Image (tube, rainbow, N blue to C red):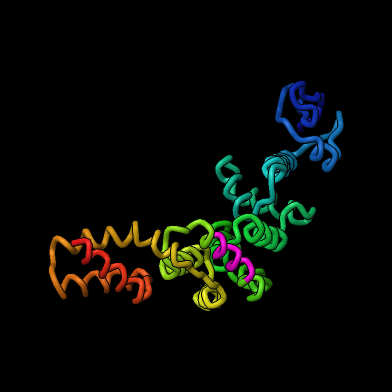
Amino acid sequence: MRIITKIARQKNNPERYNIYLNEEYAFPIDEAILIQFGLTKGKVLEEFDIQEIAYEDEIRKAFNKALNFLSYQMRSEHEVKKKLLTLEFGEAVILEAIQKLKSYGFLNDETYSKALLDTKKATMKKGPKAIRQDLIKKGIDKDLQDEVLATFSHEEQVRLATQLAEKVVRSEKKKTPTQIKVKIQDFLLRKGYSFTVVDEVLSQIVIEQEEDEWQQLLDVQGEKVWKKYASKYTGYERKMKIKQALYQKGFPIEVIDRFIEEKENEE
């Protein structure tokens, strides 16, 4: 027969107590477990009682560790489980702790997923495909992914993608409209937007170049193309190579012809 002969509060952690059985130190427990099992001096404990108390205390420790982990920011169930595994809690203990966290409302993948969606849209203007990857990394169930991403309307996607596109236009002054649109397409696809959204945005973006702006672009890109082909080709072949290269970069035919004529006159 084992009897509780002493219950002492720990000096370094006032929420935990040391339990003494038959005048000898036996085990530590959380205050919540002390109350849960009604442990008092003089109470008799059987072996199965001690094992149950130890198991419940382990769950409480995992619960407290997870609660501290959640205090810094919202987390998914997957993240909490992964964290507790690194702290070497057993699988059964972790599942019990997670259920307790969920029952108290500290852990909710649906709420977490909606918050992640809103954050990624607001701070990074990410598209659905990129946000899905973020949800996958957080261990969110596919059905929940679909449910949350369904709230990201097509209109909102176009609005955010357009804002990103306009930012690209402002930062790429040294490129032709065609080059800028290619840059926009690549950028939006990397951001996780669909081809449908990208095409709609590109159809709405108007990039106009003034005469002096074409000249500035030719001073840089045109000269590079000329140097590349002028040393390798002559006559008609050279002219066609340069014309094709500049056309692919988005220069209008009339601007290209004028540039080539000026370069040939210089020779």
Which is more toward the observer, 155 or 214? 214
Quadrant hosting residue 51:
top right
Residue 50 visible in this rendered orientation of the protein: yes
Q: Which residue sits furthest front? A: 265
Q: Position of residue 42 (x, y in %)?
A: 86, 29
> For the N terminus, which image quadrant?
top right
> For the C terminus, which image quadrant?
bottom left
Q: Residue visible at 39% across and 62% down?
A: 215
* Residue 91 painted magenta: no
Q: Is residue 71 left or right of residue 208?
A: right
Q: Position of residue 97 (x, y in %)?
A: 70, 49
Q: Residue visible at 64% across and 69% down?
A: 159
Q: Residue visible at 22% across and 65% down?
A: 265
Dominant secondary structure of the magenta stretch? Answer: helix
Q: Relative to 239, say whether 135 is above or below.
A: above
Which is more toward the observer, 137 or 52? 137
Q: Which residues are magenta?
A: 159-167
Q: Is residue 245 left or right of residue 72?
A: left
Which is more toward the observer, 105 or 14? 105
Residue 48 visible in this rendered orientation of the protein: no
Quadrant hosting residue 197:
bottom right
Q: Position of residue 77 (x, y in %)?
A: 64, 55
Q: Residue visible at 28% across and 69% down?
A: 245
